């Protein structure tokens, strides 16, 4: 049975992934629920809540509001919240209730935009998918909504600014026409963007040290850690980045959008493991290993092990998104607890690397278990053995 869990706890759902993307961007976040989903997010799925507040509200849907589709009530509450606490934008995130009542998010977004005169985005979550699905939709919404300025447009706006460090070379195909202006941006800062970062993916509340390390290693002038340090202003100028680093599968769609729109190349990776963690992973060298994590983190662990001993047999498995472009033959995606147990216990693996929670379902496993926390699975090590 796909949804039956006898050993594991439910993973973070899609609405939690969506709000994790938006949490640090300075907007008002409205969870379209009666209160329970918002409580779960703030109490369990969003670790930043206990140290850094965000404008997160529950829509407080009552039975008749949901049944009769009174979106005007939600919009009125949203407009009031914006007047009282402010915000750079507003976001409405779906839950099982509006999914059941077939809420029209495009209409809701239009209605809210007209009422508030603010930028409003809507992320259609259903509460039945996993966190990465919601995060993927939120990243898409954020970049398609806010990345509206390209380098040439920015330079044109700042052309008369004596302090601007950017220059434009303008050429015309025909001096007698008003054809498209071709602009080349010189003396630009080197900017690296990081897409896909949320605590649910990288299992960190404060990635400052790792971001600083990336900046140093790439010799970048700026590193835009979107959603965890970099806000809507940086997203507006995402087209100026020289390269994007995608650290979770949920960010791939947004990175591909930016490549299509601006030509920004991207790479995948996961530069968030400590030296102690890397040392533990290297202990698996020379053995048959199964790594269970989100895809980019799993691939990074495999890389660390294989660089230690190229003969190691490493398989990556995940419960979450798996992009075929970044998977190897033999990599596996799990859908049921029973299927996970059968695969692991029947796979003759010497070492399992994964979140501590998975050990609950693998008590018969006789090999070595190396912990690699994944917050979306267990919330670090807060799960009792």
Image: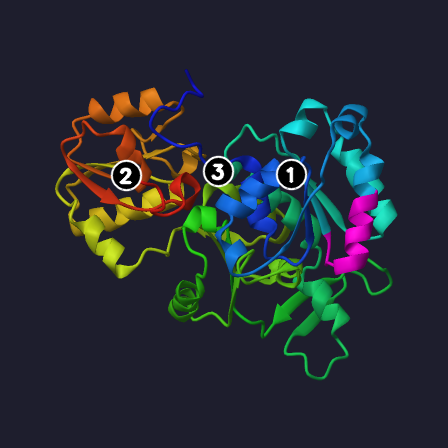
Q: Nearer the viewer, residue 171 or 137?
A: 137
Tell me where residue 163 sits by quadrant.
bottom right
| Residue 109 position (above or below residue 170) | above
- Residue under the point 58% across and 42% down: 39
SS for dot 1: loop
Earlier along the polypeptide chain: callout 1 or callout 2? 1
Earlier along the polypeptide chain: callout 2 or callout 3? 3
Tell me residue 335's x, y (percent): 40, 24
Q: Is residue 181 left or right of residue 221?
A: right
Q: Are marks 2 and 3 in contact (CB under 8 Å)?
A: no
Magenta span: chief secondary structure = helix
Q: Is residue 312 left or right of residue 321?
A: left
Please check the rendered image and state whether residue 85 is part of the magenta-colored stretch, yes or no: yes
Residue under label 2, please give it: 385
Question: Which dot marks residue 35?
Answer: 1
| Residues in magenta, as a range | 76-89
């Amino acid at each position: 049975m796909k949804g039956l869990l006898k050993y594991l706890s439910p993973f973070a759902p899609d609405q939690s992934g969506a709000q994790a993307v938006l949490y640090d961007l300075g907007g008002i976040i409205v969870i379209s629920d009666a209160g329970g989903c918002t409580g779960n997010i703030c109490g369990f799925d969003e670790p930043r809540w206990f140290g850094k507040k965000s404008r997160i509200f529950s829509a407080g849907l009552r039975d008749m509001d949901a049944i009769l589709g009174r979106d005007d009530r939600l919009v009125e509450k949203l407009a009031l919240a914006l007047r009282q606490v402010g915000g750079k934008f507003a976001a409405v995130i779906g839950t099982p209730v509006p999914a059941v009542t077939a809420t029209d998010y495009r209409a809701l977004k239009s209605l809210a935009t007209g009422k508030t005169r603010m930028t409003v985005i809507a992320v259609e979550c259903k509460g039945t998918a996993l966190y990465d699905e919601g995060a993927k939709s939120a990243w898409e919404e954020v970049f398609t909504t806010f990345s509206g300025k390209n380098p040439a447009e920015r330079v044109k706006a700042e052309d008369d600014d004596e302090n601007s460090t950017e220059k434009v070379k303008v050429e015309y195909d025909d001096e007698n026409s008003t054809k498209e202006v071709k602009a080349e941006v010189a003396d630009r800062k080197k900017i690296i963007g990081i897409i896909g970062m949320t605590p649910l993916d990288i299992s960190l509340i404060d990635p400052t040290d790792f971001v600083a390390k990336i900046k140093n290693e790439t010799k970048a002038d700026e590193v835009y850690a979107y959603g965890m340090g970099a806000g809507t202003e940086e997203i507006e100028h995402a087209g100026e980045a020289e390269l994007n680093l995608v650290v979770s599968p949920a960010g791939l769609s947004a990175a591909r959008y930016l490549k299509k729109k601006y030509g920004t190349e991207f790479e995948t990776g996961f530069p968030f493991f400590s030296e102690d963690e890397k040392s533990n992973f290297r202990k698996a060298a020379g053995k048959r290993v199964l790594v269970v994590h989100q895809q980019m983190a799993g691939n990074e662990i495999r890389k660390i092990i294989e660089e230690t001993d190229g003969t190691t047999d490493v398989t990556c498995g995940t419960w979450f998104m798996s992009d075929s472009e970044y998977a190897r033959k033999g990599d596996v995606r799990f859908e049921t607890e029973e299927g996970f147990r059968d695969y692991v216990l029947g796979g003759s693996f010497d070492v399992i690397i994964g979140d501590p929670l998975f050990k609950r379902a693998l008590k018969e496993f006789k090999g070595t278990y190396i912990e690699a926390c994944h917050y979306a699975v267990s919330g670090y090590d807060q799960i009792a053995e």
